[in-house]
Image (cartoon, helix red, strand yellow):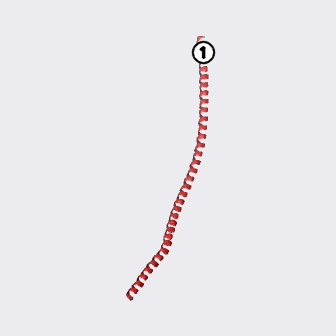
Amino acid sequence: MKINSDFKIFNFTILFTKISFTFFLSILVPPLVHAENIANLQKNASIAYEEMMKTKQSADTLTKDAVFAEKKLASIKQKLAAAEQEAKAARKKSEQAKISMEQAISRWKQATDALANEWDQTERK
């Protein structure tokens, strides 16, 4: 009977050890899992922050590029407007020169006609 009693005590000790170990694991595992989740969340947040900073830097660079392009476009538009004014002035001067040339040709023709008439009258006399 002593063996049976010792066996019961031994079984009880094993059972108590199993229950204690299970209880210990149930207390220890959640904090470890929670700590691991926190570590993963921190890692994900860090990666997301790095990506955000790269995106922000890219956006800033692109914004500066856009501002530069807008300024360049405005400058080119001003130069184009000035060139259009110069072309308009040159066309006007060209038209005026054509009119002056036509007037000079007309005066020359009148003068040559007058000269020809005078020569004709001189020869007839």
Q: In which image quadrant can residue 110 be found? A: top right
Q: Residue at x 59, y 24 (%)?
A: 105
Q: Position of residue 27 (x, y in %)?
A: 50, 75
Q: Residue furthest front?
A: 1
The residue where tag 1 is placed is: 117
The quadrant in which the N terminus is found is bottom left
Looking at the picture, tell me which residue is in the foreground, 125 or 26. 26
Residue at the spot x=39%, y=84% of the render? 7
- In the visual, does 114 lie left or right of 4? right
**Which secondary structure lies at badge 1?**
helix
Rendered image quadrant of residue 123: top right
Q: Position of residue 81 (x, y in %)?
A: 60, 40
Query: Callout 1, which amino acid?
Result: Asn
Q: Nearer the viewer, residue 121 or 110?
A: 110
Q: The C terminus appears in which quarter of the rendering?
A: top right
Residue 6 placement, left or right of 109: left
Q: Residues within 10 Å of mark 1 (few under 14, many from 20)?
A: few
Q: Residue at x 45, y 78 (%)?
A: 19
Q: Residue furthest bottom?
A: 2
Please state the horizontal and vertical placement of residue 21, each as a whole percent of the image.
45, 78
In the image, residue 87 lies at what x, y percent? 59, 36
**Residue situated in front as seen by the camera: 65 or 108:** 65
How many marks overall?
A: 1
In the image, residue 53 sits, relative to residue 122, either above or below, namely below
The residue drawn where x is 54% and y is 53% is 62
Instruction: Work out whether 22 lies above or below 71.
Output: below
Up/down of 20 relative to 78, above or below? below
